[in-house]
Amino acid sequence: MPELDPKKSLQAVYARALARERTRAKLTQDQLGGHPAVMVSGKLIGHVENCRRPPTIRLSTGLDKALDLEEFFESLYIHWADEEGPPSAIWEYFDLEYRANSIKVYAPSAITGLLQSEDYARAVFKGAHRAERVEELVTARVSRQEILRREPPPWLLVLIEEDVLRRVVGGREVMRHQLESLLTVIQEPNVTILVVPSGAPVYPGGAFTLLGFPDSQDIGFVESSVATARSSTTVPKCAS
């Protein structure tokens, strides 16, 4: 990819600064991502360094701690957000998702992103996004699934409506591979998939996720047709 030009955007300034400071600290992307103050994948660090995804305030403050800098990346983030507008709340959610030790999902209309095959995700995005944006979104979605292979992995509990499994998305071959993928992943000890029978009395109005953490309250995330990230609120620790 072409070298980033920091004169063109503050995000490029941030990206170049991150690569420079990480190199100065003699850390690989994986090492920086694994620092207790950062806790993201090395691939995510690479995406930020290449301007493939925006930084977040949590990542910025974590980078300052990991690299022993005084509010450097936090200040860059604030100026960038003031100039270009804050990134979608979905990026903050991805950061939290990576840190969670339990993820509980109710999926009434589609297979949840953490379990989507690449072709299934592509078919889902094609209906709502321009062609040039689809592959970027597919890459971001598939990369999120790395959290299921980390050590230790989070416990993932997914409730899927029966109709979702019967609905053909992207063609019969795409759906066949998607169902095969579900049968494979359900063999993992940290993954539980429950099917909600058609006609069961289910009351939630849409998809939602609960992220659990060992040292803080759970975080609730609600999706809607109006916005990808409609709300993000804490819920009692006992929520299930």
Image (cartoon, grey):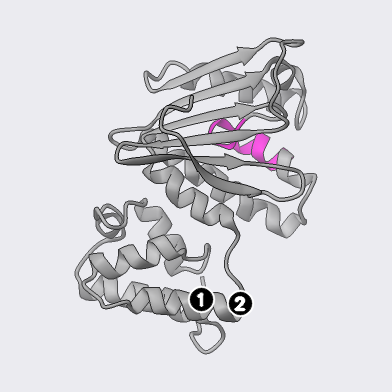
* Residue 221, x across and y down, in percent: 57, 42
Q: Residues within 10 Å of mark 2 (few under 14, many from 20)?
A: few
Mark 1 element type: helix
Q: Find residue 26 and report its horizontal and vertical position in percent.
A: 19, 69
Instruction: Answer whether residue 100 is magenta in the image.
Output: no
Q: Residue at x 31, y 56 (%)?
A: 33
Q: Main secondary structure of the magenta part?
A: helix
> Image height check: is 185 above or below 221?
above
What's the residue at 48%, 85% (across, down)? 6
Q: Are marks 2 and 1 in contact (CB under 8 Å)?
A: yes
Which residue is under mark 2?
A: 84
Q: Is residue 21 visible?
A: yes
For residue 146, the mark is: none
Seen from the viewer's position, the closer of residues 171 and 202 is 202
CA gap between label 2 and label 1 equals: 9 Å
Q: Which mark is residue 11?
A: 1
Q: Which residues are magenta?
A: 112-123
Q: Quadrant of residue 73?
A: bottom left
**Above or below for 17 versus 219:** below
Give me the residue at 60% from left, 27% from top: 106
Q: How many marks?
A: 2
Residue 137 coordinates in the image, percent (x, y): 62, 51
Question: Which amino acid does the dot numbered 1 rest on?
Answer: Gln
| Label 2 SS | helix
Q: Is residue 223 left or right of residue 199?
A: left
Regarding residue 3, the answer to whether it shows in the image is: no
Residue 24 appears in which quarter of the rendering?
bottom left
